[in-house]
Each structure stands twice: as C-alpha cells, then as structure tokens.
Image: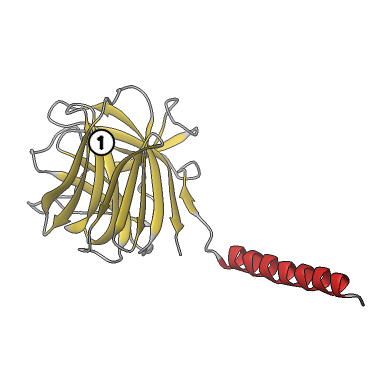
Amino acid sequence: MNPSALIVTSFIASLQLVLGTVVAKAETASPALAWNFDREQPGTLPSEFSIGTLFDGRPAGNWQVLATDRAKSPPHVFAQVMAKGAEHAYKVVLIKEVIASDLDLEVSFLPIQGQADMGGGLIWRAADDRNYYLARANPLEQNIRVYRVVKGVRHLLQNFDQTIHVKQWHTLRVIHQDCRVNIFYDDKQVFDLCDKTFHAGMIGLWTKSDAVTYFDDLQLQHVK
C-alpha cells in the first residue's frame, strides 16, 4: 500500500472511531420524561405528585387534572384551582420519585385568574416543599423572578421586567448545570446566574396566594 492510501485508510478508521463514540454517548443519554396529563382522570391528582403544606398545615392548594378546551395539548391540563390564599401562601406540588441535579426543565402555563397574585412557576432541586429553587412569572407584576427558597422563605436572586399577556400560553424553561442557571421565558433567555445552595432534588410546580393557573406539557431532561 502506498503512503497516500495508508493515510486515507488511517483517517477513515479514526473517523469511524470518533463517530462510534458519539453514537455510544447518544445511546447512553437518559431519555426525557414528560407529563401531558391526558391519560389521567379529571378531578384527580396524578399518583406520582405530592401536594405540599401551607404554613398552617393545610394542603398547599387544590391541584388536579382538568378537562378543558383551553389545554395547550388537549384534552387535559394540570391546574391549581384554589382561588384564595394569604399573601405568602405558596401552593406547591412536587413529583415524589424524580430526583435531578443537572437538568433541562420546561413547562407551559396559562394564567387564569388572581387579584393578589397571578401566574406560576417551576421548582427544581427541591429537598422538600420548604427548600428549593423557583422560577416564576407574574402577569400582575409584569416580571419574571428566580428565587432560592430556604425554610419556606424566598430569597430573590434576580428580577427581569417582562410583559406577560394573560389568556395565552407561555413557557418557562430552566437549564441548570453545576452552579450555572439559565432561565428562558417563551424561548428568550432572561437569566444567567450561579448559585450553590441546592445540589439535587425533586421538581415541581408553584403558584401563590389566590392565583389560578393551568399547566401543561411538563418536560424533564437529565443533563450530563
């Protein structure tokens, strides 16, 4: 074999090895988890979800599957429908058996009503219903905020003023790797920050006070 042919053969072999490695990595990546609530019975709480407790010990909201023609992916949504609550009544629901550290987490939400508060958000790396990260969007305040919640007390990390229209669906997305947190609203990046408080935990959904909110198409991808 002449030197030129030997070089070409070696290059092809190396390329095959690299491509094989890429394919192998893709095959070992964990599959995405998704909840669209369309197979759940309306009026029920999905079995893998757990409602937190308010500061007075009552359930943190009335979370249930609803059949509605307003669903983003019909026929069902997952909704917090308790239309009353104190100013600091955080309506929290967590997915009990899913633990994530580095993640790509997304949900669609539809603000329905609320006078003291409106909208909702995503929870991740939650130790329990008192300790977690939170990204939430509020149409009344016209802003998006990211918090760390420690022992039930919110600590603001960053604020972003944003026009948030009611009566239409929006998306919140969180990508968290190591300490780096990137948050997107309707596919636009609004936060890039670093926080080292929580390292792993459950994911969930959140509303506050008297906000009634529909959620749909919750998705989680573990990130390596």
Q: Disc 1 designates what residue?
A: 137
Q: What's the amino acid at mark 1?
A: Ala
Give the quadrant of residue 162. top left
Horizontal and vertical percent for residue 130?
A: 16, 58
Nearest the viewer among 80 and 32 is: 32
Going by the picture, which residue comes out furthest to the right? 1
- Residue 94 shows in the view: no
Going by the picture, which residue comes out furthest to the front? 3
Nearest the viewer among 149 and 24 is: 24
Residue under the image location 64 percent in, 70 percent down:
21
Residue under the image location 35 percent in, 64 percent down:
101
Label 1 residue SS: strand
Q: Is residue 126 left or right of residue 169?
A: left
- Residue 85 shows in the view: yes
Q: How is the image coloured?
A: secondary structure
Q: Is residue 18 left or right of residue 221?
A: right
Residue under the image location 33 percent in, 56 percent down:
203
Residue under the image location 47 percent in, 43 percent down:
36
